[in-house]
Image: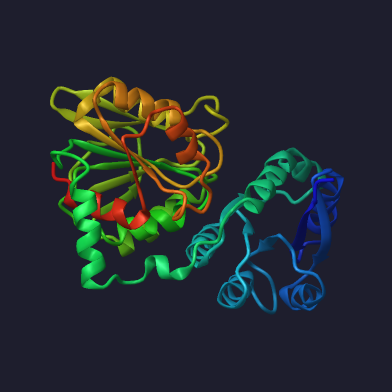
Amino acid sequence: MTTKIKVMLVDDSAVIRQTLGQLLSADPELSLIGAHSNPIFAMRAMEQQWPDVLVLDIEMPGMDGLTFLRSLMRSRPLPVIICSSLTMSGARSSVEALAAGAVEIFAKPMMSSKEDLLRVGRDIIQAVKSAAKAKIVKQQQSGALNHAAQQQLLARATNHDQHDQARLLVIGTSTGGTQALEFILSKVPATLPPIAIVQHMPAAFTKAFAERMDHISAMTVVEAEDNQLMRSGHAYIAPGGLHLQVEKRGHELYTVVRDGPPVSRHKPSVNVLFSSVAREIGSAASGFILTGMGDDGARGLLEMQEQGAVTYAQDEASSVVFGMPKEAIKLGAVNHVLSLQEISVKLSKIRP
């Protein structure tokens, strides 16, 4: 008999607790072990039974969700999904929560009615199941390396290719990707070619995420808009709910941001970005697929590789979820498998 995933819900909305609690309880793979109105009650309950996944609101009276999350991540880390409002303050707090160790965000409906919640129930349940498979990466991953370790990483990253040049870098990621991107973008120089990024994230959160990345990176990081000239030293993050592609016009590259149906169950989709890069510039690009659930990006990365692009995947040890990299490797789409540390070194060496 398969062990059910133990889920705890913390939200000050009675409608959310009742309706979302019913959805979670009805799924045969899940067991709702508590639905609490604030973190104080949740902490008492967690002393008796520890959840596999915590679904956590951010903006609550008393102890807010962000403070609670940071306390948990210091004492006993576990997969946490953020349940957030679509306000700008909610988006910024949610991005801070991702930086503190949460693995996923889902957006509360604009109206917290039962009908609205039922419409997003499938996404909520899938987010919980994905989070249950996540590995919480220890903080030492982002710590400073000693000189010997830095030299080892530099040697390994340098030996993968005979050149370190590209017109464009593309990155695709999902669960755990916000921490991976923060790690990478905080370390790369402003001399890199343009970077196009798809991070699976709901609409209204990607702008706040781009603002945070811009603050910590030497590069200029923005939420991508349609028809932007792609410049060296700039990173373009696909907006939630829209697809990002790249188009070559003469000698220049431009962003193309469009609506459309989900591809590989996602919008934005990594496959959509990677396929456009394979079609438009082929071997002049390098592709990186990072931590994430599912197989989005594998087929697009193979298309890039078949057009001569050098392709990379994050290794299992440093991934929160080794789903997307594993599928790309299985498909034969990956030239090199690197740790997150090695990927940051490799990226830092690439020049336009």
Closer to us: 113 or 174: 174
Res 144 quadrant in image: bottom left
Identify the image quadrant of residue 312.
top left
What x and y, as percent, mark residue 287? 31, 36
Image quarter (top left, top right, bottom left or bottom right) of the N terminus: top right
Q: Residue at x 16, y 30 (%)?
A: 252
In the rendered image of this protein, does residue 99 appear above or below residue 247? below
- Specify whether residue 281 is in view: no
Seen in the image, is 197 located left or right of residue 291?
Answer: left
Left or right: where does residue 9 sit relative to residue 352? right
Which of these two is toward me, 215 or 142? 142
Q: Which residue does the image show at 28% across and 60% down from the upper left?
A: 217
* Nearer to us in this view, 126 or 18: 126
Total marks placed: 0
Residue 223, how many percent across, how many down?
37, 46
Residue 245 screen position, x and y as percent: 36, 29
Q: Quadrant location of residue 32? A: bottom right
